[in-house]
Amino acid sequence: MAADNNDQPPAAEDTRPSNLGPRPFTEGGEHRAPGTSHRVSAPSTEHRESDDEISLLDILIVLAKHKKLILGLPFLAAVIAAGITLLMPNWYTATAKLLPPQQSQSNAVAILGQLGALSGGAGAALGVKNPSDIFVAMLKSRTVADAIVEKFKLKELYNTQFVQDARKALAGNTTIAAGRDGVLTISVDDKSPQRAADMANAYIDELEKLTLKLAVGEAGQRRLFFEKQLKQAKDDMSQAETELTKFQVDKRVLNPQGQASLTISAAAGLQAQIAAKEVQIMSLKSFATQDNPDLYRAQEELAGLRAQLAKVGRGGSSDPGDVLLSMGKAPEQGAQYLRKFRDMKYYETLYELLARQYEIARIDESKDATLIQVLDRAVAPERKSGPVRRRVVLLTLVVSFLVAVIGVFLAGSISRLASQPEGRRRLETLKQSLRIRLPGTTR
């Protein structure tokens, strides 16, 4: 029987892991049985959910431990912000609106319209695409700002020493913009509602003065130019008239063509009378002696006619009433007369043209180039525009709450990090990096 028992094969060793004893977990949710290398996967969903619940619970625990700081700091900050806003003065905003500027067409631009197709290019070169932008720039100009600073004594109001600082403060309290529809909006902030309205309306008044000044200045420059040219043309015309008159008096030339014709007619008539008188004398000599009174008178008349003809040939007599021209000098005197007469007519025509342009410039100077149309004048606002205390308090409350929460978690993280050797080493390294070493000091 003993032999039979020895002949039986040994029982197989049970290699299954025992249910008794702990099952150490490994990475990835696997566990390994003692004495074997076989890994068995274990479910990790419940473990992860447990970790999430623990993390959320840890957060709530941290918040609960520091509830006084998290709730007290925002409340205290909100109270302080409310107190500060109550001490701040109220600000009021007054608004004025202007219609899009309508520019009048000047006479110079109207003349360009007569150029036909060229007037389009000229208008594009001289015109303005968006006049509202120009008026915004004019309202923001130093000229308008200085006028308002002086009118409302803003140096004393804003407690500034220089006009430049008062101008900068005024720009910070003023908003000037043009909407898409072209309407100009002027908004002024001030501690006094009435002063805010007055300052907004002052911008409108200063804009009207500036546009009028610029328009009159442009037309005035043209008027002064034409006035100067007109004076010069008038002096030249007077000089030409004086020279023509002097030439007419000296040369006794009134109408060269008429006077030449008259001279020729007079010479021809004298020659005819001389011929007739010579025939008469020859007839008297045929039967009368030299002492005959008729013959003597005829000879005297013949001598007088020849003397008259000689005067006409020399250029007339010295009598101021004589209008006959010299036969030999008639072409030369006529040419001189025509030159002086042409000069006089040239300056006369130039004077007339400049006189017309001068009158047009005067008309342009007397009328406004641009009409400022006020849509809404500023009135004293009834409600304040700032500070918005409710908004400030709510914003302070939210920001301080977030700062408190972040501070609590940051302090906790630093505390946990300081409890570990590696964390303490990192904190020490951070301190050394943030430490500022002054020159000449040693560690």
Image: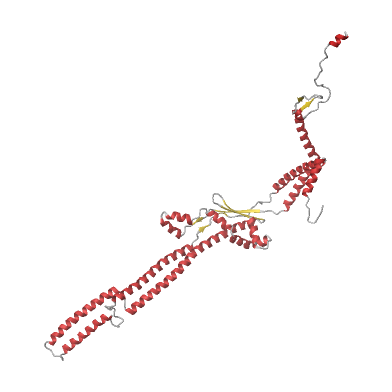
Q: Position of residue 9 (x, y in %)?
A: 82, 12
Left or right of 52 in this view: 311: left
Instruction: Report the coloring of the rendering.
Output: secondary structure
Residue at the spot x=74%, y=43% of the render? 402
Q: Position of residue 395 (x, y in %)?
A: 71, 46
Left or right of 28 in this view: 142: left
Residue at the spot x=51%, y=58% of the render? 370
Q: Looking at the image, is 146 positioned above or below residue 382? A: below
Q: Residue placed farthest to the top in the image?
A: 1
Left or right of 268 in this view: 240: right
How many callouts does the rendering have?
0
Residue sitting nearer the eye, 428 or 8? 8
Residue at the spot x=77%, y=49% of the render? 434
Residue sitting nearer the eye, 86 or 419? 419
Q: Residue placed farthest to the right in the image?
A: 2
- Would residue 254 be seen by someone viewing this image from the given angle? no
Q: Position of residue 440 (x, y in %)?
A: 80, 56
- Quarter the N terminus occupies: top right
Q: Residue placed farthest to the bottom in the image?
A: 291
Q: Quadrant of residue 260?
A: bottom left
- Would residue 313 be seen by someone viewing this image from the given angle? yes
Q: Quadrant of residue 153?
A: bottom right
Residue sitting nearer the eye, 66 or 381? 66
Q: Position of residue 228 (x, y in %)?
A: 46, 69
Residue at the spot x=81%, y=16% of the render? 12
Residue sitting nearer the eye, 346 or 423? 423
Left or right of 122 in this view: 382: right
